[in-house]
């Protein structure tokens, strides 16, 4: 979808406060080589121009660009996208346990604030080196961003608890089959959140929802429980351009879900402005 087509789509009902942040999206460009570990082709349009139009349409002024699996450990596309957005961008990099101190400092200076662990097909980092990667990036004060099949949370809970620093878990935990508050995996996620150093992105409900759009009632129940548990550590994101989704949602609808997930304006301000500012250093 072109920038012009994106700009022509509807506006959200929720008027985002000044400084609102999209904490999870990706840039793609065919000029960058795909990693050998990439599991699927990148979306057709992941350009800065199109994303700028999206940001303007939904009223977002800050962005966290996350290194996509398509490019493995080559963070060039992400860094170039961050540079194009300017001072209102931060990033999440993919590095391994052998990354040098000099490279970590360079990435930090350019706005990277976390190391990504994508523990699904296509990810460049494996569980056997995850602990070493997490330890390695503490030298620049980064947090860890984790995406996994949420059904594995109970068996990975002890390992995650052993990681130093802060941890951000993507996409409401990405817990499937069933998506329910009494699910053992969701209880595990709540225990992690209760530690005070685990954050959750309220994003991409379409990845696991059985009830589907526009309200995603099943994932919404989890999101609302998380907001009640720790509103000061919830984040919001578009997951644009929705990799591998044949029927991607309208981002205005995704923003409007916060009207249901966080009914109080003060809580929404925490989620959209205060929390990402604290975590990513805006």
Image (cartoon, rainbow, N blue to C red):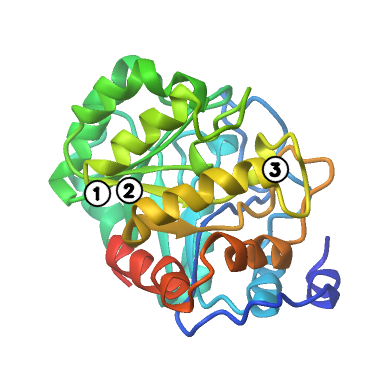
Mark 2 or 1, nearer chain start: 2
Circle 2 residue: 114
Disc 2 + disc 1, Cβ < 8 Å: yes
What residue is disc 3 on?
206
The local secondary structure at tag 1 comes to loop
Sequence-wise, which precedes: disc 3 or disc 2? 2
Q: Residue at x 58, y 64 (%)?
A: 258
Name the residue at the left extreme. 139
Residue 266 makes an appearance in the image: yes
Q: Quadrant of residue 163?
A: top left
79 relative to 271, above or below:
above
Q: Is residue 98 visible?
A: no
- Looking at the rendered structure, the secondary structure element under dot 3 is helix
Disc number for residue 142: 1
- Left or right position of 50 against 159: right
Discs 1/3, front: 3
Q: Whole-Å distance between the Cαs marked 1 and 3?
A: 29 Å
């Amino acid at each position: 979808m072109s920038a012009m087509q994106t700009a022509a789509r509807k506006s959200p009902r929720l008027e985002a406060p000044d400084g609102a942040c999209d904490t999870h999206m990706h840039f793609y460009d065919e000029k960058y080589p795909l990693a050998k570990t990439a599991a699927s082709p990148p979306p057709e349009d992941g350009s800065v121009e199109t994303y700028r139009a999206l940001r303007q349409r939904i009223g977002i002024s800050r962005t966290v660009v996350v290194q996509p699996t398509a490019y493995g450990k080559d963070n060039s596309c992400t860094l170039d996208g961050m540079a194009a957005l300017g001072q209102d961008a931060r990033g999440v990099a993919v590095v391994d346990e052998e990354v040098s101190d000099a490279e970590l400092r360079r990435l930090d200076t350019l706005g990277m604030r976390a190391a990504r662990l994508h523990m699904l097909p296509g990810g460049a980092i494996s569980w056997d080196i995850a602990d070493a990667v997490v330890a390695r990036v503490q030298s620049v004060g980064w947090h860890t961003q984790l995406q996994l099949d949420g059904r594995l949370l109970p068996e990975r809970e002890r390992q995650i608890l052993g990681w130093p620093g802060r941890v951000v878990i993507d996409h409401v935990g990405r817990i499937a089959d069933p998506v329910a508050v009494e699910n053992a995996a969701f209880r595990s996620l709540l225990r992690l959140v209760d530690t005070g150093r685990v954050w959750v992105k309220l994003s991409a409900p379409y990845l696991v929802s059985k009830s589907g759009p526009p309200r995603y009632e099943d994932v919404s129940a989890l999101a609302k429980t998380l907001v009640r548990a720790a509103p000061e550590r919830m984040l919001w994101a578009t997951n644009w351009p929705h990799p591998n989704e044949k029927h991607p949602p309208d981002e205005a609808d995704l923003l409007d879900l916060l009207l249901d997930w966080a009914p109080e304006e003060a809580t929404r301000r925490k989620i959209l402005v205060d929390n990402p500012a604290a975590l990513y250093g805006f």
